[in-house]
Image: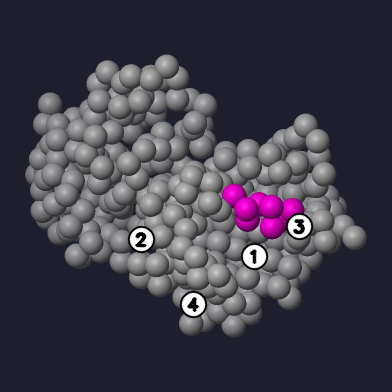
Amino acid sequence: MKRYIVLENGEVFAGEAFGAEGDSAGELVFTTSMVGYTETLTDPSYYGQIIMHTFPEIGNYGVMYEDMESPHSAACGYVVGNYCRHPSNFRTDTDIDSFLKAQSVPGVYGVDTRALTRKIRSAGVMNAAIVSDPASVDLKKLRSYKIKDAVKKATSSEEEIYEPENAEYTVVLYDYGAKKNIVRSLLKHNARVISVPATTPVKRVKDIAPDGIMLSNGPGDPAENKEEIAIVSSLLGYRPLFGICLGHQLAALAAGAKTVKLKYGHRGANQPVKELSSGRTFITSQNHGYAVDSDTVKTGSVSFVNANDFTCEGVDYPQLNAMTVQFHPEACAGPKDMRGLFDEFNKMMKGGKK
Protein backbone atom coordinates (compact mmCIF):
# COMPACT_ATOMS: atom_id res chain seq x y z
CA MET A 1 0.00 0.00 0.00
CA LYS A 2 1.33 3.43 -0.92
CA ARG A 3 2.18 5.88 1.85
CA TYR A 4 3.58 9.38 1.49
CA ILE A 5 5.83 11.78 3.37
CA VAL A 6 4.75 15.39 2.92
CA LEU A 7 7.24 18.05 4.00
CA GLU A 8 6.13 21.42 5.35
CA ASN A 9 7.45 23.05 2.17
CA GLY A 10 4.97 20.99 0.13
CA GLU A 11 7.39 18.43 -1.30
CA VAL A 12 6.06 14.87 -1.43
CA PHE A 13 8.05 11.62 -1.22
CA ALA A 14 6.33 8.35 -2.11
CA GLY A 15 6.99 5.06 -0.38
CA GLU A 16 5.30 1.91 0.89
CA ALA A 17 3.41 1.48 4.15
CA PHE A 18 4.52 -0.73 7.03
CA GLY A 19 4.03 -0.62 10.76
CA ALA A 20 0.84 0.80 12.25
CA GLU A 21 -2.05 2.16 10.21
CA GLY A 22 -3.08 5.80 10.22
CA ASP A 23 -1.64 9.23 9.50
CA SER A 24 0.72 11.21 11.72
CA ALA A 25 2.76 14.40 11.86
CA GLY A 26 5.97 15.40 13.61
CA GLU A 27 9.41 16.89 13.29
CA LEU A 28 11.37 14.86 10.72
CA VAL A 29 14.91 14.08 11.93
CA PHE A 30 17.57 11.67 10.71
CA THR A 31 19.91 9.35 12.58
CA THR A 32 23.14 7.94 11.16
CA SER A 33 23.24 4.83 13.37
CA MET A 34 23.75 1.56 11.51
CA VAL A 35 22.51 -0.56 14.41
CA GLY A 36 20.62 0.06 17.65
CA TYR A 37 17.25 0.74 16.03
CA THR A 38 15.42 -0.89 18.97
CA GLU A 39 17.10 1.55 21.34
CA THR A 40 16.42 4.43 18.95
CA LEU A 41 12.72 3.62 18.61
CA THR A 42 12.28 3.43 22.40
CA ASP A 43 14.39 6.47 23.34
CA PRO A 44 11.97 8.99 24.93
CA SER A 45 14.08 11.83 23.54
CA TYR A 46 12.40 11.23 20.15
CA TYR A 47 9.04 12.39 21.49
CA GLY A 48 7.14 14.33 18.81
CA GLN A 49 9.53 13.36 16.02
CA ILE A 50 9.51 11.19 12.91
CA ILE A 51 12.69 9.09 12.89
CA MET A 52 14.48 8.49 9.59
CA HIS A 53 17.49 6.18 9.24
CA THR A 54 20.23 7.06 6.79
CA PHE A 55 21.42 3.43 6.89
CA PRO A 56 19.53 1.69 4.06
CA GLU A 57 18.62 -1.66 5.67
CA ILE A 58 16.90 -1.82 9.06
CA GLY A 59 15.59 -4.78 11.04
CA ASN A 60 18.10 -7.50 10.09
CA TYR A 61 18.55 -8.77 13.64
CA GLY A 62 14.96 -8.22 14.73
CA VAL A 63 13.74 -6.50 17.89
CA MET A 64 14.75 -7.62 21.38
CA TYR A 65 12.52 -6.45 24.21
CA GLU A 66 15.46 -6.62 26.62
CA ASP A 67 17.20 -3.87 24.63
CA MET A 68 14.32 -1.39 24.82
CA GLU A 69 15.18 1.92 26.52
CA SER A 70 11.56 2.47 27.64
CA PRO A 71 8.33 0.44 27.46
CA HIS A 72 6.84 2.52 24.66
CA SER A 73 7.99 4.33 21.54
CA ALA A 74 7.60 8.11 21.65
CA ALA A 75 8.14 8.48 17.89
CA CYS A 76 5.44 9.89 15.61
CA GLY A 77 6.63 7.88 12.64
CA TYR A 78 9.44 5.79 11.18
CA VAL A 79 11.13 6.11 7.77
CA VAL A 80 13.63 3.64 6.28
CA GLY A 81 15.05 2.74 2.91
CA ASN A 82 14.18 -0.93 3.34
CA TYR A 83 13.27 -3.22 6.22
CA CYS A 84 13.99 -6.88 6.83
CA ARG A 85 10.88 -9.04 7.00
CA HIS A 86 12.65 -12.16 8.24
CA PRO A 87 15.33 -11.26 10.81
CA SER A 88 18.04 -13.73 11.80
CA ASN A 89 19.17 -13.61 15.43
CA PHE A 90 18.86 -16.09 18.28
CA ARG A 91 17.75 -13.24 20.58
CA THR A 92 14.96 -11.96 18.32
CA ASP A 93 11.58 -11.46 20.00
CA THR A 94 9.75 -9.96 17.01
CA ASP A 95 10.31 -8.26 13.67
CA ILE A 96 10.39 -4.49 13.12
CA ASP A 97 7.04 -4.37 11.30
CA SER A 98 5.21 -6.18 14.09
CA PHE A 99 6.94 -4.03 16.68
CA LEU A 100 5.82 -0.81 15.00
CA LYS A 101 2.25 -2.11 14.81
CA ALA A 102 2.29 -2.98 18.51
CA GLN A 103 3.69 0.47 19.33
CA SER A 104 1.18 2.32 17.09
CA VAL A 105 3.96 3.88 15.02
CA PRO A 106 3.24 4.28 11.28
CA GLY A 107 6.18 3.59 9.00
CA VAL A 108 7.29 4.24 5.43
CA TYR A 109 9.86 2.21 3.50
CA GLY A 110 11.09 2.31 -0.07
CA VAL A 111 11.51 6.06 0.14
CA ASP A 112 14.64 7.89 -1.04
CA THR A 113 16.12 8.52 2.42
CA ARG A 114 19.32 9.93 0.92
CA ALA A 115 17.40 12.67 -0.88
CA LEU A 116 15.35 13.39 2.24
CA THR A 117 18.48 13.62 4.37
CA ARG A 118 20.06 16.06 1.93
CA LYS A 119 16.91 18.19 2.14
CA ILE A 120 17.16 18.35 5.94
CA ARG A 121 20.91 19.03 5.92
CA SER A 122 20.36 21.87 3.47
CA ALA A 123 17.16 23.47 4.80
CA GLY A 124 17.29 22.31 8.41
CA VAL A 125 14.87 20.14 10.38
CA MET A 126 11.37 20.30 8.93
CA ASN A 127 7.94 19.20 10.03
CA ALA A 128 6.46 16.36 8.00
CA ALA A 129 3.32 14.28 7.73
CA ILE A 130 2.99 10.57 7.02
CA VAL A 131 -0.25 10.07 5.10
CA SER A 132 -2.04 7.84 2.63
CA ASP A 133 -3.36 10.88 0.71
CA PRO A 134 -0.99 13.83 0.17
CA ALA A 135 -3.90 16.07 -0.81
CA SER A 136 -5.30 15.77 2.72
CA VAL A 137 -2.39 17.65 4.30
CA ASP A 138 -2.99 21.20 5.50
CA LEU A 139 0.48 22.73 4.97
CA LYS A 140 -0.25 25.77 7.11
CA LYS A 141 -1.23 23.55 10.01
CA LEU A 142 1.79 21.30 9.42
CA ARG A 143 4.18 24.26 9.48
CA SER A 144 2.71 25.40 12.80
CA TYR A 145 3.36 22.05 14.48
CA LYS A 146 5.61 22.42 17.53
CA ILE A 147 6.77 19.99 20.18
CA LYS A 148 5.46 21.23 23.54
CA ASP A 149 5.48 19.94 27.13
CA ALA A 150 7.75 17.10 26.03
CA VAL A 151 9.34 16.44 29.43
CA LYS A 152 5.93 16.41 31.12
CA LYS A 153 4.88 13.67 28.69
CA ALA A 154 8.13 11.69 29.00
CA THR A 155 8.83 11.78 32.74
CA SER A 156 7.69 9.13 35.21
CA SER A 157 4.70 9.78 37.46
CA GLU A 158 6.19 8.36 40.66
CA GLU A 159 9.44 7.44 42.36
CA GLU A 160 11.11 4.14 41.58
CA ILE A 161 13.96 2.46 43.47
CA TYR A 162 16.57 0.19 41.88
CA GLU A 163 18.91 -1.82 44.10
CA PRO A 164 22.33 -3.13 43.01
CA GLU A 165 23.92 -6.24 44.51
CA ASN A 166 26.41 -4.17 46.50
CA ALA A 167 25.26 -0.63 47.11
CA GLU A 168 28.04 1.85 47.87
CA TYR A 169 26.21 5.04 46.90
CA THR A 170 22.69 6.42 46.62
CA VAL A 171 21.91 8.46 43.51
CA VAL A 172 18.78 10.49 42.85
CA LEU A 173 18.02 10.28 39.13
CA TYR A 174 15.86 13.09 37.78
CA ASP A 175 13.83 11.40 35.05
CA TYR A 176 13.20 13.76 32.13
CA GLY A 177 12.63 10.77 29.83
CA ALA A 178 15.49 8.61 31.08
CA LYS A 179 16.87 5.73 29.05
CA LYS A 180 16.97 2.44 30.97
CA ASN A 181 20.65 2.06 30.26
CA ILE A 182 21.41 5.03 32.51
CA VAL A 183 19.88 3.11 35.40
CA ARG A 184 21.71 -0.07 34.38
CA SER A 185 25.02 1.81 34.22
CA LEU A 186 24.54 3.32 37.67
CA LEU A 187 23.66 -0.10 39.09
CA LYS A 188 26.83 -1.58 37.57
CA HIS A 189 28.74 1.14 39.39
CA ASN A 190 27.23 0.06 42.73
CA ALA A 191 24.75 2.89 43.03
CA ARG A 192 21.32 2.54 44.57
CA VAL A 193 19.13 4.54 42.20
CA ILE A 194 16.07 6.49 43.28
CA SER A 195 14.41 7.71 40.08
CA VAL A 196 12.16 10.72 40.64
CA PRO A 197 9.75 12.70 38.40
CA ALA A 198 11.08 15.78 36.61
CA THR A 199 9.56 18.36 38.98
CA THR A 200 10.36 16.62 42.27
CA PRO A 201 10.95 19.40 44.86
CA VAL A 202 14.42 20.08 46.21
CA LYS A 203 13.17 19.33 49.72
CA ARG A 204 12.39 15.74 48.75
CA VAL A 205 15.92 15.27 47.41
CA LYS A 206 17.42 16.69 50.60
CA ASP A 207 15.21 14.39 52.65
CA ILE A 208 16.73 11.46 50.75
CA ALA A 209 20.23 12.95 51.27
CA PRO A 210 21.83 11.10 48.33
CA ASP A 211 25.53 10.80 47.60
CA GLY A 212 24.97 12.15 44.09
CA ILE A 213 22.42 13.50 41.64
CA MET A 214 22.00 12.41 38.02
CA LEU A 215 20.11 14.50 35.45
CA SER A 216 18.84 12.32 32.61
CA ASN A 217 18.27 12.73 28.91
CA GLY A 218 14.89 13.84 27.62
CA PRO A 219 13.00 15.41 24.72
CA GLY A 220 12.08 18.90 23.59
CA ASP A 221 13.39 22.44 23.92
CA PRO A 222 15.46 22.64 27.13
CA ALA A 223 14.65 26.33 27.72
CA GLU A 224 10.95 25.46 27.95
CA ASN A 225 11.47 23.68 31.28
CA LYS A 226 11.40 26.64 33.66
CA GLU A 227 10.43 24.68 36.77
CA GLU A 228 13.05 21.99 36.15
CA ILE A 229 15.76 24.61 35.57
CA ALA A 230 14.90 26.31 38.87
CA ILE A 231 15.16 22.96 40.69
CA VAL A 232 18.55 22.20 39.16
CA SER A 233 19.76 25.70 40.06
CA SER A 234 18.94 24.99 43.70
CA LEU A 235 20.73 21.63 43.60
CA LEU A 236 23.99 22.76 41.96
CA GLY A 237 26.69 22.53 44.60
CA TYR A 238 24.52 20.52 47.03
CA ARG A 239 25.87 17.09 46.03
CA PRO A 240 28.05 15.76 43.19
CA LEU A 241 26.01 16.09 40.01
CA PHE A 242 26.25 14.37 36.63
CA GLY A 243 24.09 15.47 33.69
CA ILE A 244 23.53 13.69 30.38
CA CYS A 245 22.03 15.19 27.20
CA LEU A 246 18.97 17.23 28.29
CA GLY A 247 20.38 17.08 31.83
CA HIS A 248 23.54 18.73 30.49
CA GLN A 249 21.48 21.49 28.89
CA LEU A 250 19.32 22.10 31.96
CA ALA A 251 22.41 22.36 34.17
CA ALA A 252 23.93 24.91 31.79
CA LEU A 253 20.73 26.96 31.77
CA ALA A 254 20.59 26.76 35.58
CA ALA A 255 24.18 28.07 35.70
CA GLY A 256 23.35 31.06 33.49
CA ALA A 257 24.29 29.82 30.00
CA LYS A 258 22.00 29.68 26.97
CA THR A 259 20.95 26.96 24.52
CA VAL A 260 20.42 27.14 20.76
CA LYS A 261 18.56 24.97 18.28
CA LEU A 262 20.85 23.20 15.82
CA LYS A 263 20.13 23.19 12.10
CA TYR A 264 19.58 19.44 11.96
CA GLY A 265 20.96 18.13 15.25
CA HIS A 266 23.30 15.28 16.10
CA ARG A 267 21.70 11.84 16.02
CA GLY A 268 23.64 8.62 15.63
CA ALA A 269 26.13 6.24 17.22
CA ASN A 270 29.15 7.59 15.32
CA GLN A 271 29.48 11.20 16.49
CA PRO A 272 33.10 12.32 17.10
CA VAL A 273 33.78 14.32 20.25
CA LYS A 274 37.07 15.94 21.25
CA GLU A 275 38.14 16.13 24.90
CA LEU A 276 39.83 19.50 25.31
CA SER A 277 42.05 18.53 28.24
CA SER A 278 43.71 15.60 26.45
CA GLY A 279 43.13 16.35 22.78
CA ARG A 280 41.72 12.83 22.32
CA THR A 281 38.73 12.20 20.07
CA PHE A 282 36.06 9.70 21.05
CA ILE A 283 33.20 8.14 19.11
CA THR A 284 29.92 8.76 20.89
CA SER A 285 26.21 8.10 20.67
CA GLN A 286 24.03 11.22 20.47
CA ASN A 287 20.44 12.30 20.03
CA HIS A 288 19.77 16.01 20.39
CA GLY A 289 18.46 18.95 18.40
CA TYR A 290 19.63 21.67 20.81
CA ALA A 291 23.07 22.56 22.15
CA VAL A 292 24.60 24.70 24.87
CA ASP A 293 26.03 27.92 23.44
CA SER A 294 29.72 27.71 24.38
CA ASP A 295 30.14 31.48 24.31
CA THR A 296 27.60 31.87 27.10
CA VAL A 297 29.24 29.40 29.51
CA LYS A 298 30.59 31.61 32.32
CA THR A 299 30.25 29.27 35.30
CA GLY A 300 32.47 26.26 34.66
CA SER A 301 34.30 25.51 31.42
CA VAL A 302 33.65 23.61 28.22
CA SER A 303 35.22 20.14 28.48
CA PHE A 304 34.22 18.47 25.19
CA VAL A 305 33.40 19.80 21.72
CA ASN A 306 31.93 18.16 18.65
CA ALA A 307 34.75 17.39 16.21
CA ASN A 308 32.52 18.20 13.21
CA ASP A 309 30.93 21.54 14.09
CA PHE A 310 32.75 22.40 17.37
CA THR A 311 29.52 22.80 19.35
CA CYS A 312 29.59 22.25 23.11
CA GLU A 313 29.56 18.58 24.14
CA GLY A 314 30.38 18.91 27.83
CA VAL A 315 30.89 21.33 30.71
CA ASP A 316 32.83 20.88 33.94
CA TYR A 317 31.83 22.80 37.07
CA PRO A 318 34.64 22.05 39.57
CA GLN A 319 33.48 24.72 41.98
CA LEU A 320 30.03 23.10 42.06
CA ASN A 321 31.30 19.49 42.01
CA ALA A 322 29.37 18.85 38.82
CA MET A 323 30.02 17.63 35.28
CA THR A 324 27.71 17.30 32.30
CA VAL A 325 27.97 15.87 28.79
CA GLN A 326 25.79 16.23 25.70
CA PHE A 327 26.49 12.72 24.40
CA HIS A 328 25.42 9.37 25.92
CA PRO A 329 28.25 7.72 27.91
CA GLU A 330 25.91 4.85 28.85
CA ALA A 331 25.53 3.85 25.18
CA CYS A 332 27.91 1.59 23.25
CA ALA A 333 29.28 3.76 20.45
CA GLY A 334 33.01 3.45 21.09
CA PRO A 335 31.84 0.82 22.18
CA LYS A 336 32.68 1.69 25.79
CA ASP A 337 35.03 4.64 25.43
CA MET A 338 33.03 6.96 27.67
CA ARG A 339 31.97 4.57 30.44
CA GLY A 340 34.83 6.04 32.47
CA LEU A 341 32.64 9.07 33.16
CA PHE A 342 30.58 6.90 35.51
CA ASP A 343 33.83 6.05 37.33
CA GLU A 344 34.52 9.77 37.58
CA PHE A 345 31.07 10.28 39.05
CA ASN A 346 31.81 7.59 41.62
CA LYS A 347 35.05 9.37 42.54
CA MET A 348 33.11 12.60 42.98
CA MET A 349 30.63 10.86 45.28
CA LYS A 350 33.39 9.10 47.20
CA GLY A 351 35.10 12.44 47.78
CA GLY A 352 31.85 13.89 49.04
CA LYS A 353 31.48 11.09 51.58
CA LYS A 354 34.78 11.86 53.30
Pick whichever of labels 3 and 4 is earlier in the sequence: 4
**Residue 22 visible at all:** no
Q: Which residue is mark 3?
A: 347
Q: Residue at x 50, y 70 (%)?
A: 279
Q: Are marks 3 and 4 in contact (CB under 8 Å)?
A: no
Q: CA distance from mark 3 to mark 2?
A: 32 Å
Nearer the observer, disc 3 or disc 4? 3
Q: Quadrant of residue 35?
A: top left
Pick whichever of labels 2 and 4 is earlier in the sequence: 2
Task: Count neighbours of disc 1 (C-alpha within 10 A) and say few if under 14, some if 14 to 19, many if 20 or more.
Answer: many
Q: Residue furthest right?
A: 354
For label 1, the SS is: strand
Relative placement, left or right, of 214 versus 191 is left
Q: Are marks 3 and 2 in contact (CB under 8 Å)?
A: no
**Image location of residue 13, percent across then percent down:** 11, 45
**Image location of residue 205, percent across then percent down:** 78, 54
For label 2, the SS is: strand
Q: Residue at x 30, y 27 (%)?
A: 60
Q: Which residue is mark 2?
A: 265
